[in-house]
Image (tube, grey):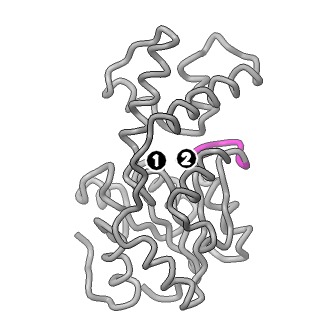
């Protein structure tokens, strides 16, 4: 892949394989508020910003402060229950290589500040990111491309100079709508489904991404 000056990383499901922890926290939180859903029912509604998701599950609540408080409650449950925080294989090594080669690492996640801090500090990788853009900075969640457009704006890079790393369909759609190349990682979906939704390449871990970016030894799956 040529002319890559910046890589925009999603966080949840991309830097670490944690989407099942988020799902479990959501189901626990919703049950606490007398909303019982199967994992499949929840997955169909799990897209957008935290604020948008809370509004979807609590349509009768219109007060912005209350919606924010509910979102903070859910995320606190997630952080309390998630103990075994590990990076996807090869992440730290890739970030170090990007730093050495002066390729910008950018974080573009719908996560809020406490969750961003939780992940970056547990993985000890904050120093590698040139910019961090979170869901609290945008008005619309993925598949709207706002998060990636803002990330590029902060870095001073153009779409054809970047590539997005994503694990979800809504994230892939957001990247494509921003006209950015996108590489899927197979934590949430199978390779074939990621390619079907527009990924340029698919990887299983960051060792494969390092080879794809710098050695040209891996091809699309």
Determine which of the numbered discs, if any, sits on residue 148 in the image.
none
Q: Secondary structure at mark 1?
A: helix
How far apart in space, not on screen, are marks 2 and 1 (Cα)? 6 Å
Q: Residue at x 49, y 21 (%)?
A: 29
> Depth check: 201 or 73 in front?
73
Q: Secondary structure at mark 2?
A: loop
Task: Answer with the quarter of the image where residue 208 lies.
Answer: bottom left
Left or right: residue 151 versus residue 171 is right
Left or right: residue 155 versus residue 121 is right
Q: Residue at x 61, y 60 (%)?
A: 148
Q: Which residue is mark 2?
A: 142
**In the rendering, at what x and y percent does residue 117 appear?**
63, 52
Q: Residue at x 50, y 66 (%)?
A: 164
Tell me the quarter of the image containing the N terminus. bottom left
Task: Answer with the quarter of the image where residue 81 lies.
Answer: top left
Q: Which residue is mark 1?
A: 170
| Label tally | 2
């Amino acid at each position: 892949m040529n002319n890559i000056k910046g890589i925009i990383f999603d966080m949840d499901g991309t830097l670490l394989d944690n989407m099942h922890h988020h799902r479990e926290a959501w189901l626990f939180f919703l049950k606490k508020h007398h909303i019982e859903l199967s994992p499949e029912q929840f997955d169909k509604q799990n897209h957008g910003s935290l604020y948008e998701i809370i509004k979807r599950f609590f349509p009768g609540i219109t007060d912005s402060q209350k919606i924010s408080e509910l979102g903070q409650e859910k995320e606190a449950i997630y952080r309390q229950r998630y103990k075994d925080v590990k990076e996807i294989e090869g992440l730290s090594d890739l970030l170090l290589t990007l730093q050495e080669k002066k390729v910008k690492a950018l974080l573009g996640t719908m996560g809020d500040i406490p969750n961003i801090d939780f992940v970056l500090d547990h993985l000890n990788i904050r120093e590698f990111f040139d910019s961090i853009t979170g869901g609290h900075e945008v008005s619309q969640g993925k598949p709207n491309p706002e998060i990636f457009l803002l990330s590029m704006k902060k870095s001073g890079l153009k779409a054809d100079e970047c590539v997005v790393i994503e694990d979800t369909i809504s994230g892939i759609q957001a990247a494509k709508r921003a006209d950015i190349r996108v590489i899927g990682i197979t934590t949430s979906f199978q390779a074939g489904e990621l390619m079907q939704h527009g990924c340029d390449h698919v990887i299983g871990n960051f060792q494969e991404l390092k080879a794809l970016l710098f050695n040209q030894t891996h091809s699309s799956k």
